[in-house]
Amino acid sequence: MDGKHIEVETLLRKTSGSYDWEKSWLDFLAEWYNVQDFIEVQTSGSTGAPKTIRLNKTFVAASARRTIRFFNLKENDRVLHCLPSNYIAGKLMIVRALIGKLDLHVVDPSTDFSFLTQESFKFAAMVPNQVGKLLEFVRQPADWNPDFAGTPFGRLEFLLLGGSAIPQNLVKKLQAISTACYSSYAMTETATHIALRKLNGPGASEFYHCLDDIEVELSKAGCLRIKVPGLEKPLQTNDLAELQDKKTFQVLGRADNVIISGGIKFSPEQLEKKLEPYIKQPFMISWLPHEMLGQQLILLVEGNQSAETNQQLQHIFQQQLDKFERPRKIRFISKLPRTLNGKIDRKSVNPS
């Protein structure tokens, strides 16, 4: 903390932090060591109203150990904690450090990461916005330590990305770096990630692979069901998925987002994935009622309407989408609604 090594016992005697981000992780440290056998965590609100749930500390510790084993983290390995500690991903960074006796370096989540010109870490977890910020920073060669040439993330060995969907253009940029980058499939109820997929380098894949002791299956509706030791019963999700086997799966989109147009089911997430490399503005696929089709596909774009933009978008549709996948209309909106963690809030969108 602040570039100083501080023992856990000393931190537990610290009553408050100077900043909100510091206070949040000190508060969690105290909660982890209190007499209760559970911690309280708040869901992100991405699939409904945010709520507070309780997770048994033994269950949380098991999740931390899975990550430690996967990334082969050893005692005194330097790990970077740059996530808010009021959500489960940030809390688990602390638990991993405690259980694995790791050398945890805690920084403000809003950092510009300039310290990475001089520091090296074995493991860090970030949200896509932070990774984008870091990529912009390291584009300035004059700011970069020449000892780190060819490694734009400093000597960062493993990077875990989560918190929201990872833009395809960001994944493309990650192909040029040596840091091994992974995407997480995670939720609060499972004490963060249950599966990971490699984003760059050897082993890169569109499929997630479950961590130790975890298996998945599909419901009759084709949605992912997760079996995690410590849960009383399998956890049913609303994520449509494709399975290779009981440990390997690909997420296709959310069942409650499916649009049925002319009797054909469309996953807006899959269509957006096709369009994402070509549309610079924030956008989403939505629908409007239609007398013949039931629901007609439309594109919502953040920004001002113009004839030129309309023409460009229609050209992108022709090049990247099959005939029946192409939105029938384009609507422009001043700002797409978002959840607290920055995801587009589909349920709050009014396309009419």
Image (tube, rainbow, N blue to C red):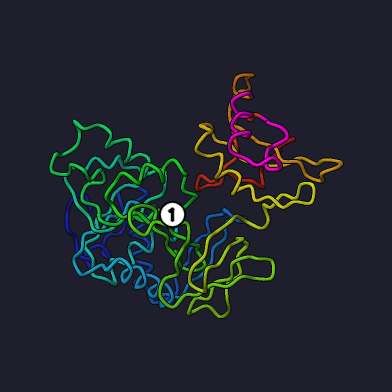
Decide whether residue 277 is among the magenta residues: no
Q: Residue at x 59, y 23 (%)?
A: 309
How dense is the environment of label 1, judged by Cα within 10 Å: few (below 14), some, or many (20 and up)?
many
In the rendered image, which quarter contains the C terminus? top right
Closer to us: 324 or 251:
324
Position above or below: 222 against 180: below
Q: Image quadrant of residue 315?
A: top right
Position above or below: 205 against 172: below
Q: How many circles with numbers are drawn on the protein?
A: 1
Q: In the rendering, at what x and y percent does residue 234 appear?
A: 57, 76
Is residue 215 left or right of 6 when viewed as pictured?
right
SS for callout 1:
loop
Which residues fall within the magenta stretch?
Answer: 311-331
Q: In the rendering, at what x and y percent does residue 246 appear?
A: 52, 74
Q: In the rendering, at what x and y percent does residue 30 appear?
A: 34, 66
Q: What amino acid type is highlighted by mark number 1?
A: Gly
- Residue on which the image places disc 1: 162
Closer to us: 64 or 52:
64
Q: Image quadrant of residue 217?
A: bottom right
